[in-house]
Image: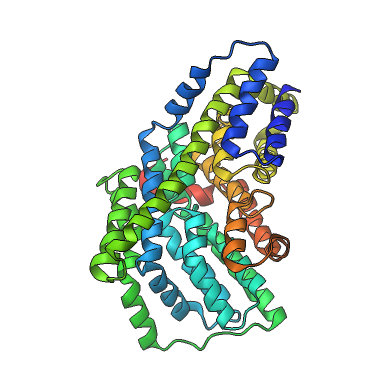
């Protein structure tokens, strides 16, 4: 009963328009006061501070910075042209280009919103010029942006690893195959929708055009190789990899492509600062809220309730997925992760579920949350840059949501898919 009341109050604050971070802090504080328990204000600051001091979390602002530098420095345009030469000749060509470009860009930024706001703007404009309806262009862009936090590097994996102590390198590797499956599912949806609506295809690129575009994008395409290779080779940690990605993007934008100017840097740094503050403030507030629910024995109550149902491993995972998807409709994805990880991890340990496998499940669930109203951040970002209202965009995005959900079910019941690569390269 207490658990339902806590989350009802939290959702109530959200519906009233209270910012997510503030809503979590108020919910916890009010719960203490209503129960007549001693509430010390300094405790809030201490818990918020301790949540954000993990070394791993330093990766977040640097991956955000890397994405912003790539969007301004000409890297995203070259990635788009390479994808166009590669798959533009299929039916619904620019829809496929959209997905493939996002899969490539996801290996550089690790953030869905960076993909949607940067590469997405280029994709939507190109699709509109080629005669694609705005809502189709926006839906493909929003859906494909969610591949970003699954294919490494990934900000959600960094957060999950910092809280649980699970190897971020293993989590990065575990995201490869699920991310590719997400891209394939979206391309299948694009193909059938394009066939039904008779959308155009682009002329097949000649071998020379393909070679030219791949040559132009070669240095940009090397970013994932540098990041993952450096982590696996022990050259740098995942946190240091974010710094390397930023420096490499700065080098390409200013030294190689020469499209990034000194006058662009203050705006890039300011946008990175604002986005980082928003993310880390949510993490800090969610850290206090997470400590509060553990203090109130919410995880123990849930474990006892679910254990009494004799669900087994798969039944437990399906209930957790349902809870995550519902929360994703009302809370920002990072907040969902930070709040629920302390609740679910004891259950995961009890049922001997691999924490790397579970990290991928949680991340895919949060990607679905990014596309579902009323708090879908990618949905709102794409709506703002495309001019398509949330209602029509939500309806248009349904086939891609079903595809992501199908991938979620596949990797849930076939853990060997996400675990194959990390076990192969880093051991079980």
Judge whether 208 appears above or below 115 on screen: below
Image-quadrant location for residue 70? bottom left
Q: Quadrant of the N terminus?
A: top right
For image coordinates 58% across by 28% down, the residue present is 25
Q: Is residue 378 above or below residue 361?
A: below
Q: Is residue 300 visible?
A: no
Picture quadrant where residue 300 is located: top right
Give coordinates of residue 150: x percent, y percent. 50, 53
Query: Looking at the figure, which quarter contains the C terminus?
Result: top left
Residue 247 relative to residue 393: left or right: left
Query: Is residue 392 found left or right of 362 in the rendered image?
Result: right
Residue at screen point 62% across, 62% down: 383
Vertical side of 357 occupied by 37: above or below: above
Q: Nearer the viewer, residue 332 or 232?
A: 332
Q: Position of residue 378 (x, y in %)?
A: 58, 56
Q: Report the residue at 66% width, 78% height from top.
A: 194
């Amino acid at each position: 009963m207490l658990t339902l009341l806590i989350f009802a109050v939290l959702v109530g604050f959200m519906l009233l328009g209270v910012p997510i971070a503030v809503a979590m802090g108020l919910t916890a504080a009010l719960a203490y006061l209503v129960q007549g328990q001693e509430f010390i204000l300094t405790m809030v600051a201490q818990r918020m501070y301790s949540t954000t001091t993990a070394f791993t979390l330093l990766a977040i602002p640097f991956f955000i910075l890397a994405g912003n530098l790539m969007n301004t420095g000409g890297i995203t345009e070259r990635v788009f042209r390479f994808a166009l030469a590669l798959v533009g000749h299929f039916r619904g060509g620019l829809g496929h280009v959209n997905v493939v470009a996002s899969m490539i860009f996801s290996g550089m930024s690790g953030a869905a919103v960076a993909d949607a706001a940067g590469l997405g703007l280029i994709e939507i404009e190109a699709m509109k010029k080629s005669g694609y309806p705005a809502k189709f262009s926006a839906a493909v862009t929003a859906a494909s942006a969610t591949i970003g936090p699954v294919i490494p590097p990934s900000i959600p994996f960094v957060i999950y690893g910092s809280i649980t102590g699970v190897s971020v390198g293993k989590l990065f590797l575990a995201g490869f195959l699920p991310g590719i499956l997400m891209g394939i599912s979206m391309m299948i949806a694009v193909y059938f929708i394009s066939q039904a609506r008779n959308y155009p295809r682009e002329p097949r690129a000649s071998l020379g055009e393909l070679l030219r575009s791949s040559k132009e994008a070669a240095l940009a395409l090397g970013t994932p190789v540098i990041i993952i290779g450096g982590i696996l080779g022990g050259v740098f940690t995942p946190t240091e990899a974010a710094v390397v990605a930023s420096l490499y993007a700065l080098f390409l934008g200013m030294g190689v492509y020469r499209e990034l100017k000194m006058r662009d840097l203050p705006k890039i740094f300011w946008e990175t600062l604002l986005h980082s503050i928003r993310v880390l403030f949510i993490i800090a507030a969610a850290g206090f809220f997470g400590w509060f629910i553990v203090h109130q024995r919410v995880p123990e109550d849930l474990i006892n309730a679910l254990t009494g149902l004799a669900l087994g491993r798969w039944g437990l995972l399906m209930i957790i997925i349902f809870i995550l998807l519902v929360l994703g409709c009302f809370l920002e994805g990072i907040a969902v992760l930070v709040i629920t990880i302390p609740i679910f991890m004891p259950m995961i340990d009890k049922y001997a579920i691999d924490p790397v496998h579970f990290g991928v499940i949680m991340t895919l669930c949060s990607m679905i949350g990014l596309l579902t109203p009323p708090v879908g951040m990618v949905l709102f970002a794409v709506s703002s840059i495309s001019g398509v209202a949330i209602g029509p965009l939500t309806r248009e995005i349904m086939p891609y949501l079903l595809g992501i959900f199908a991938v979620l079910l596949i990797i849930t019941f076939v853990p060997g898919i996400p675990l194959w690569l990390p076990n192969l390269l880093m051991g079980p």
